[in-house]
Image (tube, rainbow, N blue to C red):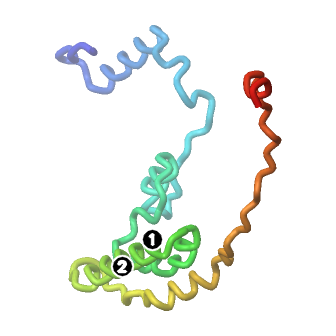
Amino acid sequence: MTKRRPPGMSNQDWVESQIKLAQNQGEFENLPGAGKPLKLADQHDPDWWVKEFLDREDIETEALLPPAMLLRKEKQQVHEKIRGMRRESEVRDYLADLNKRIRLSIRDTTGPVVPTGPVNEDAIIAQWRMDRPSTAPRPKVEEHRPARKKSIWQRLFS
């Protein structure tokens, strides 16, 4: 911790003496980013710090969207989302949940108004059925087991 500025010494002189003292003690050596150019912001972009934070923390920009926009994007990507689902009950549950969230968003008066209507569950499920590969029953494969060797007692007494 630094000492207090002595009375009668100007702030600039005090700061300069503290910097020289730290340099002499080697506190500025081996710092991260040493020898690399400074990243100065573009003067015309007032949101440079937000963009840099998003890049540095690896945050997806979709997380910043309002909920109504997120629902609209999710509705547009519903076919890709259900493609990986295996059972019709999973698809129905997902679509029912999505419609419930869309209806809640329509009733919500806060935030931007983004026109998003509920999805047609029956049409999407019909499309999901057509996109799935046919699930024909597999023929049963009989395994050929070699005859079990009889024990010595079975061979003696048979």
Vertical order, 87 against 9 (above or below): below
Q: Residue furthest front?
A: 157
Q: Residues within 10 Å of mark 2 (few under 14, many from 20)?
A: some
**Are the residues at dot 2 and dot 1 in contact (C-beta closer than 8 Å)?**
no
Q: Is residue 141 left or right of residue 49?
A: right
Vertical order, 25 against 44 (above or below): above
Residue position marked by numbered label 2 in the rendering: 96
Foreground of the two, 26 or 156: 156
Foreground of the two, 56 or 39: 56
Q: Quadrant of residue 142?
A: bottom right
Vertical order, 65 against 68 (above or below): above
Foreground of the two, 116 or 139: 139
Residue position marked by numbered label 1 in the rendering: 90
- Tell me the quarter of the image containing the N terminus: top left
Residue at 79% across / 27% down in the picture? 155
| Type of the residue with mark 2 | Ala
* Mark 2 vs mark 1, CA separation in Å: 10 Å
Q: Secondary structure at mark 1?
A: helix
Residue 4: image tag: none
Q: Provide residue 134's location: percent of width, then percent of height.
A: 67, 78
Q: Provide residue 122's location: percent of width, then percent of height.
A: 46, 90
| Type of the residue with mark 1 | Glu
Question: Of tags 2 and 1, which is closer to the observer?
Answer: 1
